[in-house]
Image (cartoon, coloured by chain):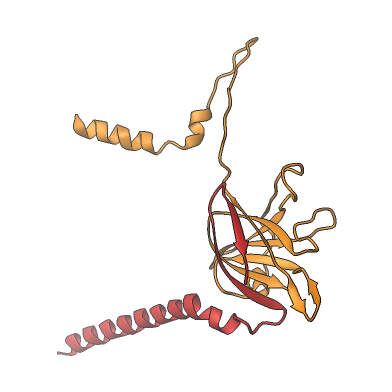
Chain colours: A red, B orange
Amino acid sequence: MKENTTFLLSIELILIVLILLYLLNFLSTNLTGLFVKGIEKNWIYLGKVKIENSTLTLQEFP
Amino acid sequence: MDLKILIFAIIVSQIPLSYALTLTIKKASITDLGIEEVLVDYGMLIGTLRFKLGNYTWPPKEIWLLPAQVNPDEFSQGLKQLTILELPENLTFSTCRTAVYFNESLGYGFKIYNTQTTKQIFKNGTFCGLAYEGEYHVFAKY
């Protein structure tokens, strides 16, 4: 009985750690821009461009 | 037998393209490589960007291409310039000299700016930069 409880607790701990890691990764990749966009002094965000090898990309900014 | 052919095909498919350019030079003989056009492993971005205040306009001081929406100052903090991408001087209106930075957690970033000897951002806001293949977020400093 005690072994079972310990086992379940360790599974829970692993799951919690995994969820925390997922959340951390999500926040760092998706939400960073929200804090930066339009807030930082002297910097302006213009948009996204796609660059391809050996290709000339013409970009018009609004 | 089929397995051997499959293994051979896999090995051959993994040989880098540069092997196609391998040649042998023999003593006292002329080797003609012929005409080769090799694609470069970067692309070019051009455009025009000006800031406006009333009737005044001015070009950006720096333009950054970054792999994520992060402040360029934060992205480059503590980083050393990895390399320079640059075109030959007589090729186009600018050498498009671009500094390459590498951030371990985010990837490559490219800084387009004027140096004492080269011009990438002109007074009318026209600029030119080089970057490796990929999608980037563009930031400009005013």
Question: Residue A62: x and y, percent?
Answer: 62, 72
Q: Is residue B77 visible?
A: no
Is B58 situated left or right of B49 in this image? right
Query: Residue at left 34%, top 84%?
Result: A16
Q: Quadrant of residue B28?
A: top right
Query: Could one spot residue B100 in this view of the protein?
Result: yes
Can you say which quadrant of the picture contains the C terminus of chain B?
A: bottom right
Say if B136 sits above or below B19 in the image. Answer: below
Left or right, A39 with respect to A22, comes to right
Residue furthest to the front in view is: B55
**Left or right for A25, reference B67:** left
In the rendered image of this protein, does residue B1 appear above or below residue B81?
Answer: above
Q: Residue furthest right?
A: B116
- Quarter of the image for residue A22 reads bottom left
Q: Residue furthest left?
A: A1
Where is residue A4 shown, x and y percent of the image?
17, 86
Residue at screen point 85% across, 57% down: B116
Rendered view: B142 above or below B64 = below
- Pick the residue in front: A56 or B141: A56
The image shows residue B131 at horizontal and vertical percentages of 61, 55
Residue B128 image offset from top left, x and y in percent: 69, 56
Which image quarter holds the N terminus of chain B?
top left
Viewer-nearest residue: B94 or A62 = A62
Quadrant housing residue B112 = bottom right
Asked whether B68 or A45 is in front, the reply is A45
